[in-house]
Amino acid sequence: MTVPDSSAFGPTGPVDPEGSAAPSAPADPVATGLAGRTAATGGPVRLDGPWTHRDVAANGARFHIAEMGEGPLVLLLHGFPQFWWTWRHQLPALADAGFRAVAMDLRGVGGSDRTPRGYDPANLALDVTGVIRSLGEPDAALVGHDLGGYLAWTAAVMRPKLVRRLAVSSMPHPRRWRSSMLSDFAQSRAGSYVWGFQRPWLPERQLLADDSALVGSLIQDWAGPRTPEFPDEETLDVYRRAMSIPSTAHCSIEPYRWMVRSMARPDGIQFNRRMKRPVRVPTLHLHGSLDPAVRTRSSAGSGEYVEAPYRWRLFDGVGHFPHEEDPIGFSTELINWLKDPEPDR
């Protein structure tokens, strides 16, 4: 295994690292920019909009959700370094299309509980399926981006009866991701931030330094050139403030630490074997053609793990955030697929 340089996550100035068991109460942001305008009612997480906010209990923790609309449940799962707000364009689009759209904050992020443990993908996937049950729904269409996509793949294997359909953006199947990170030097280099996360405390300090400036840099670096208006400064400010909530940096990194450190451990080997089970629900796989964090070649082979209709769609000129870089195109593709009674293979 070749580990590329991960100096981007080296130590910086004297920023105190976050503990893993701090409470989840958000800190009040400075009332400037978009985050400031919405802070009056919900701090840096419960941002105002046409959606409603509430908390639900699942899998031994409390999860913050934003929801809109009525109809079949579509549960949206964010990635790193973001939170539920990444789906701000899709929530109203799905609600207008006749769905109950719910965006949740993953464990340790946004308005959800920051627990001292439980950041392995199996447990995080149980968080997702537990939220489906807590919402009183028999099943859901899961839509996941980045880490949220990893968990969506996992939930579809672990709890297939609770997953009606699966849509994944910017993330290969977990077995494909593991193989690419270990055997493809180009993908290993593109994912160098994952290797950098393996050091203790230093990545947390890096994420928090200079008011979480690295969060803005990562989003800018991972976005494609097609939509220069994304990300703007106000959008970056929202994500930076959310990362600055105590313990968020630590909790955001923990799933990636598990992915690497467990590779040779019994729990990681067992998880990798478990993911050999095929996905048996219709699957939509979306990817930006210029994604610098997850290469197209790494994701494209994921269809071999799906024994159901599988549709692959590539967004030309788009980077790691197709749902934000091309929100209309992404929402249109997603809604058309959700409404298609017989999605193509």
Image (tube, grey):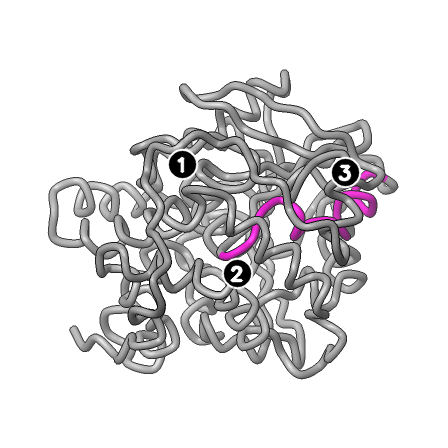
What SS does tag 1 mark?
helix
Residue 223 found in image quarter: bottom right
> Mark 3 is on which residue type?
Ala
Left or right of residue 268, residue 159 in this image: right
Height in image: 90 above or below 178?
Answer: above
The residue wearing badge 2 is 211
Kindly identify the residue that appears in the image at 41 percent across and 19 percent down.
60
Secondary structure category for the residue under label 2 = helix
Circle 1 residue: 124
Nearer-N-terminus badge (2/1): 1
Residue type at the position of mark 1: Leu
Image vertical order of residue 127 relative to residue 142, above or below? above
Residue drawn at (42%, 50%), measured in percent from left and top? Answer: 249
Label located before the other in sequence (3 or 2): 3
Q: Residue sitting at 37 percent across and 30 percent down?
A: 115
Q: How far is the residue under mark 2 from the one under mark 1?
A: 28 Å
Pinpoint residue 227: horizontal percent, then vertical percent.
Answer: 73, 77
**N-term mark: 1 or 3:** 3
Residue situated in front as seen by the camera: 84 or 14:
14
Position of the C terminus, as image quadrant, is bottom right
324 vs 331, nearest the viewer: 324
Left or right of residue 116, residue 80 in this image: right
Residue placed under numbered mark 3 in the picture: 40
The stretch of residues the image draws in magenta is: 81-95
Q: Residues within 10 Å of mark 1 (few under 14, many from 20)?
A: many
Left or right, 329 with reference to 149: right
